Amino acid sequence: MVYFISQPIKKRKNKMEKAFIKPPKKILFFLRIGLYVSKKVTGKDLLPARLLSWVPRAAIGSGVLEMMTAKGKDSQEKRLLNLVRLQASLICSCAFCIDMNAAGINTNGITEDELLVLQGKRDIQTVSTFNLHELLALQYAIILSSTPLSLTEKFIKNLTSEFSEKEIVMLASTIASVNYWARLNQGLGIPPAGFSEQCLVFNNYRV
């Protein structure tokens, strides 16, 4: 069971807030193209992308990572990926990530009871709407986002019996991507961008 301490944050206006550092005043042309595309897709002038412009290789690598991350081929897979991305965001206590991934809660049919489970406020055994794949994927997200990482033989057996090799790689890479963005955003002090109506910041947890 995972326990969290949470604090609500009011909805933020569609503008960037201050991080630890400022974006560069001059951004290379090809990076500006990426920023334009990112804004068209998300509707936000994303601060992480602007700060990464200080190091073009980091900006390009991070952009490719996000672009190549699995998005889901159907509604069921999109819901599964949203669940694991949100769960990993909560474990990492990344306000930006939680805010961004919480935006898909209604679209992907994540209920209030399920959200309470992800926040550690309700026992997962009391919510019957998760299927077996989702239960295993959520546990996988918790394990891979925790330190030290502990994968038991029993869990690996359950995981490999329910998911194909391709699906496991999809889940692991998605969870790892969230962890990357979480540490980057936290390391630069990047605040939520206002993707969702409410963002919950998880200050502490224990497994």
Image (cartoon, grey):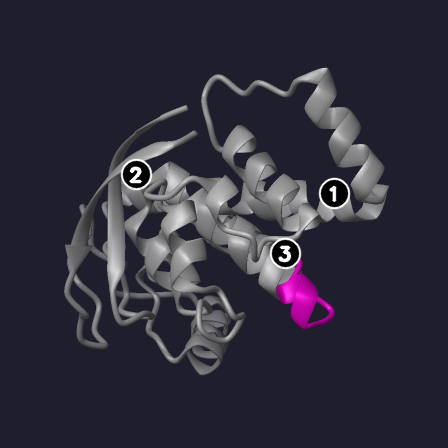
Q: Residue at x 54, y 20 (%)?
A: 149
Q: Amino acid at mark 3?
A: Thr
Residue 193 place in picture, x, y as percent:
28, 65
Residue 132 place in picture, x, y as percent:
69, 46
Q: Residue at x 36, y 54 (%)?
A: 98
Specify whether 139 is left or right of 53.
Answer: right
Q: Amino acid at mark 1?
A: Val
Q: CA distance from mark 3 to mark 2?
A: 22 Å
Specify whether 73 is left or right of 98.
Answer: right
Residue 39 falls in which quadrant of the image? bottom left
Query: Which dot marks residue 69?
Result: 3
Q: Circle 2 sits on which residue?
A: 187
Specify whether 206 is left or right of 189.
Answer: right
Is residue 92 or residue 83 the one in the foreground? 83
Classified by dominant secondary structure, the portion drawn in magenta counts as loop
Numbered disc 1: secondary structure: helix
Q: CA distance from mark 1 to mark 2?
A: 27 Å
Residue 206 place in picture, x, y as percent:
35, 24
Task: Give the magenta range.
Answer: 69-78
Specify whether 168 is left or right of 52.
Answer: right
Q: Residue at x 66, y 17 (%)?
A: 152
Report whether residue 123 is seen: yes
Question: Which callout, 1 or 2, points at the residue further toward the start of the chain?
Answer: 1
Which corner quadrant holds the N terminus?
A: top left
Q: Residues within 10 Å of mark 1 (few under 14, many from 20)?
A: few
Q: Is residue 96 above or below residue 75?
A: above
Q: Circle 1 sits on which residue?
A: 169
Numbered disc 2: secondary structure: helix
Q: Is residue 63 above or below residue 164?
A: below
Q: Amino acid at mark 2?
A: Gly
Numbered disc 3: secondary structure: loop
